[in-house]
């Protein structure tokens, strides 16, 4: 493949070479089943325990509170569906936000079909959950609040501690989808009063198809995948030993380098935002300017189609996204951009660029020049833009 500039780290990340290296022996040499008695199996079991320790430490939890899963979507499904079923004798009301990932939103739709009631709390124009609305939504039969840690499209960081405190005061379980945040921002589940937390390996330079659900000791949710006794009877299925090992290595690396990485990536992000704002007219930064992930840039450009922009960027070797990877291809504008109040036509012209420490200023310069050129060309073809410019000319007279 020609050289590519990868700016879609919210969709997935390139694997850390050390994680790839670390996984290989668990395919080739130590292939034993972690549940077996013989020594070959013990090697696998030890490797899984090591990863569980690393990951437990990384969120200030006990290793015994970490349950490996097949990824972020499974963790979200498990947390919501089983918390609902396990606590329904107390009530059938659940609260979430309007800007969750589809792994949460579509699970909530399923719960509604099963007879649960779900309140979708709004966010403000910058994508921050309205805490007053959250408090007002709480009822005596509310059993669960699920709010994401950081949004995958616009990068907004939610007031997780405040939400955790509200949940705790009201004796309601609190789950957070931390798939975008884990490995990128410090997380302490006790300080934040989080009861359940979802994360996924491939969003922090680990492998795809492996994640975990943190379940606080004492939270009595049942297993979601039924079968063998793996994961202390709570998640059946032969352990994905190489995946878990790679996830552990990526998590350890992310924790050790987090401060430096955040500083570096945030500087790249701010440089990119500044150049686009200065050089591309009629653009709007989506999401909160400071309370956002260090790697997230999301702009709307008036008078263009995000899909056309993506295709033309791809021709220049640039990987980007117009919303979340799950919605691109569909023509519905992103539910997140609509929730922060963008009109349909502006939401359609949006571009998400998500960085990593592997990006350079030179790459970003190339990207800004490409965006500038393509947006200009697309606008030249837009009748709406022509009308707008003509109208503006009249106003000026
Ligand atoms: C990617 C993502 C998921 C899904 O994780 P998978 O491991 O791909 O299943 C869930 N929530 C958020 C916020 C995400 O960004």
Image (cartoon, rainbow, N blue to C red):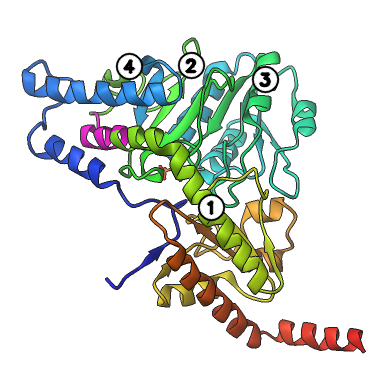
Q: Is residue 228 visible?
A: yes
Q: Quadrant of residue 30?
A: top left
CA gap, disc 1 and disc 4:
45 Å
Counting from the top left corner in percent of width and height, residue 394 is at: 89, 88
The residue that appears at 68% across and 76% down in the rendered structure is 303
Circles 3, 1 touching at the beta carbon (< 8 Å) = no
The residue that appears at 66% across and 69% down in the rendered structure is 278
Given the current orientation, which residue lies at the most extreme right position? 397
Q: Give the residue number, with chain letter if any, for mark 1.
A: 267
| SS category of the residue bearing label 3 | helix
Does the Cβ of the disc 2 residue fall within 8 Å of ligand 1? Answer: no
Quarter of the image with the N terminus is bottom left
CA gap, disc 1 and disc 2:
35 Å
Circles 1, 2 touching at the beta carbon (< 8 Å) = no
Q: Give the residue number, with chain letter if any, for mark 3.
A: 165
Q: Which residues are magenta?
A: 239-248
Magenta stretch encompasses residue 309: no
Q: Quadrant of residue 306?
A: bottom right
Magenta stretch encompasses residue 240: yes
Which of the two discs, 2 and 3, labels the residue nearer the N terminus?
3
- Residue 275 lies, with reference to residue 124, above or below; the image says below
Q: Which mark is residue 233?
A: 4
Q: Give the residue number, with chain letter if any, for mark 2.
A: 216
Q: Which secondary structure is most common in the magenta stretch?
A: helix
In this rendering, the label closer to the viewer, 4 or 3: 3
| SS category of the residue bearing label 1 | helix
């Amino acid at each position: 493949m020609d050289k590519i500039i990868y700016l879609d780290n919210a969709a997935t990340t390139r694997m850390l070479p050390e994680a790839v290296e670390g996984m290989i022996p668990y395919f080739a040499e130590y292939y034993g089943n972690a549940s077996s008695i013989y020594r070959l199996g013990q090697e696998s079991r030890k490797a899984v325990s090591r990863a569980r320790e690393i990951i437990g430490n990384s969120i200030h939890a006990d290793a015994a509170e970490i349950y490996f899963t097949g990824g972020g979507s499974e963790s979200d499904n498990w947390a919501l569906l089983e918390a609902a079923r396990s606590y329904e004798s107390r009530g059938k009301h659940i609260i979430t936000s309007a800007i969750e990932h589809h792994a949460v939103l579509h699970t909530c739709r399923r719960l509604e079909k099963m007879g649960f009631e779900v309140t979708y709390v709004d966010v403000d124009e910058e994508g921050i959950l309205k805490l007053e609305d959250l408090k007002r939504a709480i009822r005596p039969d509310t059993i669960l609040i699920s709010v994401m840690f950081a949004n995958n499209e616009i990068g907004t960081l939610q007031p997780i501690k405040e939400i955790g405190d509200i949940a705790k005061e009201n004796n309601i379980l609190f789950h957070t989808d931390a798939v975008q945040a884990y490995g990128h921002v410090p997380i302490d589940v006790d300080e934040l009063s989080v009861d359940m937390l979802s994360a996924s390996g491939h969003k922090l330079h680990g492998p795809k198809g492996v994640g975990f659900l943190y379940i606080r000791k004492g939270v009595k949710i049942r297993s979601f995948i039924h079968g063998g006794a793996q994961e202390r009877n709570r998640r059946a299925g032969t352990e994905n030993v190489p995946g878990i090992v790679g996830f552990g290595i990526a998590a350890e690396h992310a924790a050790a380098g987090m401060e430096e990485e955040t500083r570096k990536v945030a500087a790249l992000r701010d440089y990119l935002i500044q150049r686009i704002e200065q050089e591309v007219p009629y653009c709007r930064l989506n999401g909160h300017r400071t309370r956002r992930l260090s790697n997230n840039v999301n702009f709307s450009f008036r008078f263009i189609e995000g899909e056309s922009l993506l295709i033309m960027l791809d021709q220049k070797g640039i990987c980007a996204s117009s919303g979340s990877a799950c919605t691109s291809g569909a023509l519905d504008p992103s539910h997140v951009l609509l929730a922060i109040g963008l009109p349909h036509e502006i939401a359609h012209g949006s571009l998400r660029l998500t960085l990593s420490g592997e990006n350079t200023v030179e790459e970003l310069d190339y990207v800004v020049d490409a965006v500038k050129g393509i947006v200009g060309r697309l606008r030249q073809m837009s009748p709406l833009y022509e009308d707008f410019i003509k109208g503006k000319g009249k106003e000026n007279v």
